[in-house]
Image (cartoon, helix red, strand yellow):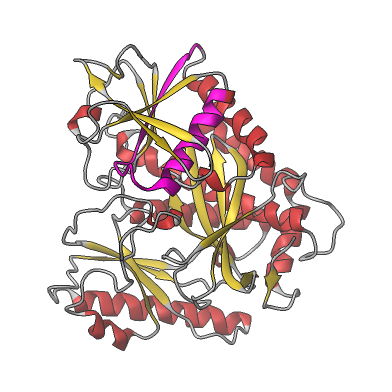
Amino acid sequence: MVPHLVTALTGPINELEQRVLDSMPAIERWFRLEWMEHTPPFYSAVDIRNAGFKLAPVDTNLFPGGWNNLTKEMLPLAVQAAQAAIEKICPEARNLLVIPENHSKNTFYLANVAQLVRIFHMAGLNVRIGSIDPAIKTPKKIELPNGDTVTLEPVVRTKRRLGLKNFDPCTILLNNELSAGTPGILEDLHEQYLLPPLHAGWSVRRKSNHLHSYEELSKRFGKLLGIDPWLINPIYARAEGVDVAGGRGIDVLTSHVDAVLTKVRRKYKEYGINEKPFVVVKGGHSGSGSPGVVTVRDAKDVESLIGKPRGTAPAPAVPATKASQSREPRELREPTELIVQEGVLTNERVHNGMAEPVVYMMDRYVVGGFYRVHAERAADENLKLPGASYVPLAFSESAHLPQPGAKPGASAPNRFYMYGVVGRLAMVAASYEMEATDPDAEIYE
């Protein structure tokens, strides 16, 4: 069940796994205390890369769109977490309205919506799907290849509430990352709970805020475990005022790339790692489906990006079977902020393809996940591209519970527990990020 690791099953990742297992009571207490002070995101998904010498999150998504990749065995965990989440927010909740992305032709994405409906229905709610797509003017029933059906209904907005014809929800669940901006129809809903909040959408959110929160947390967590925080945290820099297509601010980007690569080389030397460091350059306000992720191995290569459209990865028509491309097209804004992030290799293989685990969480709980696998990509490349496939992570077959005494690297539950710890750490960082950017936060002088 443990994926094949190219790196020999000795060395830092197993030391880290052992340290995590030995510290389990302290770790769980640490998370418990964090959640006493901070509100977890309603749901989240974290992409993790295991390099064999470090394990780090590379993307945190607050509008997860791959719930259909969770196995049936994982559903009880998701339902319990959904009940806990709803109970905290609106204990008397009866009706839930799900607002999906505006692409009703992508059956893979709609299978994810159907799974969300199933989870919340089993959690004890009446669930309907309300589309904010202007093209949906009457209820539209869509049959999916897996046998599920979804019915998209046009939303009805009154002065203070959002609902459907003859359906008034107390809670609205967004599964729409709002990349193209916040539609007015979702604003000023003061009588209903909107989850996640509007400032979690990509029209407001900045990756640099999240990375800053995660960096601070990884230092504290590293101290708790007695480890170098670099083992769980990718080095990053923020390059502002850069327009790659127009050739402006390239010197700023080059200097940041050079600085991050220098820091990573130093770490590789310290740990005796014989790999060539690389960085990924990505937009600071682009959503989870963005193809604009560029791998750079040398600062001199930055010059070659000039004049290219944002992101060199291909963005072909959306295939109906790929979760990573299930987001609606986003407007190509002039990027003013780019993130230069230490590239984390993936040394995991599933079915002979490069693989990275994706951990799914609801409220404060890990509920499951899957491997994103790509047979045509290299260990230092982005896997979130057409051609990816999805292999479930069987967290729930008692794999959510670690097995004390098992040899490091030999136990699937222990490896997955470690993924869950790093995923939850990124979730805590997201809660800090949301508090810091909340436009309605109370300010104490």
Query: Where's residue 397, x and y in %?
Result: 76, 45
- Residue closest to the eye, 134 or 412: 134
Residue 437 visible in the snapshot: no
Query: Where's residue 120, x and y in %?
Result: 53, 27
Determine the residue positioned at 17% across, 58% down.
333
- Looking at the image, which residue sits at the far right? 405
In this rendering, position of residue 309 left or right of residue 236: left
Determine the residue positioned at 31% across, 19% down.
163
Query: Where's residue 412, x and y in %?
Result: 75, 57
Determine whether 201 is above or below 212 in the image: above
Determine whether 271 is above or below 283 in the image: below
Tell me the quarter of the picture where residue 123 sits. Answer: top right
Numbered disc total: 0
Tell me the quarter of the picture where residue 316 sits. Answer: bottom left
**Is residue 98 magenta-colored?**
yes
- Residue closest to the eye, 280 or 268: 280
Q: In which quadrant will I find the N terminus?
A: bottom right
Question: In this picture, which residue range is highlighted in magenta?
Answer: 92-121
Query: Where's residue 137, x and y in %?
Result: 22, 28
In this rendering, position of residue 416 left or right of residue 302: right
Q: In which quadrant will I find the C terminus?
A: top left
**Is residue 215 magenta-colored?**
no
Determine the residue positioned at 68% across, 73% down.
5
In this rendering, position of residue 260 left or right of residue 39: left
- Residue closest to the eye, 315 or 147: 147
Residue 417 visible in the snapshot: yes
